[in-house]
Image: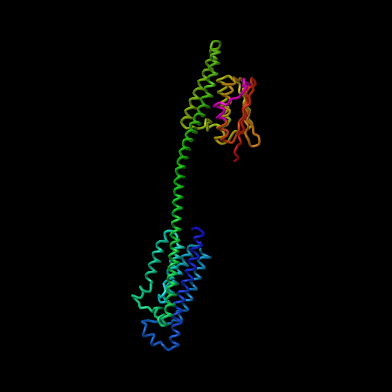
Amino acid sequence: MIKSVEITLSKLRIFMFCVNVCACLFVMGIIHVTSNTICANFQATAFLSSVERIPVNPHASFFWTFFLCFLFFISYTVRHFFFKSNQRMLYATLFADFIINILVLFFTNFNYEGLTLLLLANVMYYVAGARKFPAMILGIFVYMALSYDMINVWYPLYSVRSYIAYYPRQYQHVLLFVFYAFSALNLICFTLFCMMIINDQKYTINEINSLNRKLEKANIELKEYADIKEKMGETKERNRLAMEIHDTIGHSLTGISVGVDTCLAIMDSNPKAAKSQLEVISGVAKNGIADIRRSVRKLQSDVSSTQSLEQNIMDMLEKTQKATGIKIFFDNSVVLKFESDEENAIFRVIQESVTNAIRHGKASEIRIKTFMELENLIIVIQDNGQGCKEFVSGFGTTHMKERLSMLKGTITFETEKDKGFTVKALIPLRKE
């Protein structure tokens, strides 16, 4: 509920309370004063002959009406200032209002039922959710059932109009005007209250509709985003598959290519050595095929889960040496046991760097060194190949960068014409 509307509704209810208290005390005041005047002037016999019923004790009725109005005020104060956010106590005070209202109607002999409208206004203001509508229906039913004319059909009641008729005509007009003015003013306040509640509900419904439209728009945007993300995921998987195939088949074919060239060179002069070399090349080819199948089927890491990372690296380097005849030195001072994605990245960096040194650098010697620096793993791969004047990143080096960027790592390439090529990778390892 908007703050300004809430303040206005609160003021309206306070004003209605004042009007109703004044109306109840006005009614009982007329009966009390008129009864005293009749008794003082010894006109009881004449008055009794003109009315059907009179109150049993008008003085006590006036006192109890005043006391009950005071209790109504206490109930309102307690609810508004102390238990506004406590739903259980809020309903308890509303029920107390209902009992007080019944008692006021009883002591005023149902001559003024405007207090029931105030009770209904409180119900509309405080009761929220699904309970509001049944509570309003019950309040309207109570208001209709407890009206003076409805009760008077079944049980004769005394009327304040009989006491007003005791006075001279000019006074009667004034007293009746005040009595009807209280009723009309209370009804006008209740009508305004209902209109403000309806407008506030209409504003709330419009706000909800507006939020629903925004939510629908957001859902459409989220769906579009999900589609884009799905496509990006497919692209990422394709790239990963391409990277895996490049790393496995590229490394295997490089070893096979260099090995075949060696076989061709020694075939005539040393057939036995050439045959032995071909057997090594055959093993490399079979391993490459197995790696490709594994990558395509499951997109798993090429690092075997049954062996340590160091053993996998040593096996890969040993096969490469046998297939190509190139000298490879591996200097490791670290226990190579990390998370699977870290181990895969380390393996791939070394594998791709060795492949590039053989394929592009035409190197005859490769040195690999791994060591810790602070909490970072450093990998340095250096070859004695032909290097290049200007380095241009290719498919393999690009994917090395991508692998390490996922681990928040970095990789640098240093080369100089005829002075070899150096790869330096830095991987910040995760803490336990």
Quick check: is 382 in the magenta stretch? Answer: no
Residue at 48% over, 25% down = 289
Horizontally, residue 122 falls left or right of residue 340, namely: left
Based on the displayed image, in which of its 4 quarters is residue 103 positioned?
bottom left
Residue 341, percent from left and from top: 55, 35
Outermost residue, bottom direction?
42
Outermost residue, top direction?
268
- Position above or below: 379 against 389: below
Residue 236, percent from left and from top: 50, 33
Q: Nearer the viewer, residue 398 or 163?
A: 163
- Position above or below: 216 against 425: below
Horizontally, residue 430 falls left or right of residue 242, namely: right
Q: Main secondary structure of the magenta part?
A: loop
Residue 190, percent from left and from top: 44, 66
Quick check: is 399 in the magenta stretch? Answer: yes
Q: Nearer the viewer, residue 276 or 346?
A: 346
- Position above or below: 169 against 128: below
- Give the total of numbered labels: 0
Q: Nearer the viewer, residue 194 or 173?
A: 173
Outermost residue, left direction?
153
Quadrant containing the C terminus is: top right
Coloration of the structure image: rainbow
- Position above or below: 134 against 345: below
Residue 327, percent from left and from top: 61, 21
The span shown in magenta is 384-400
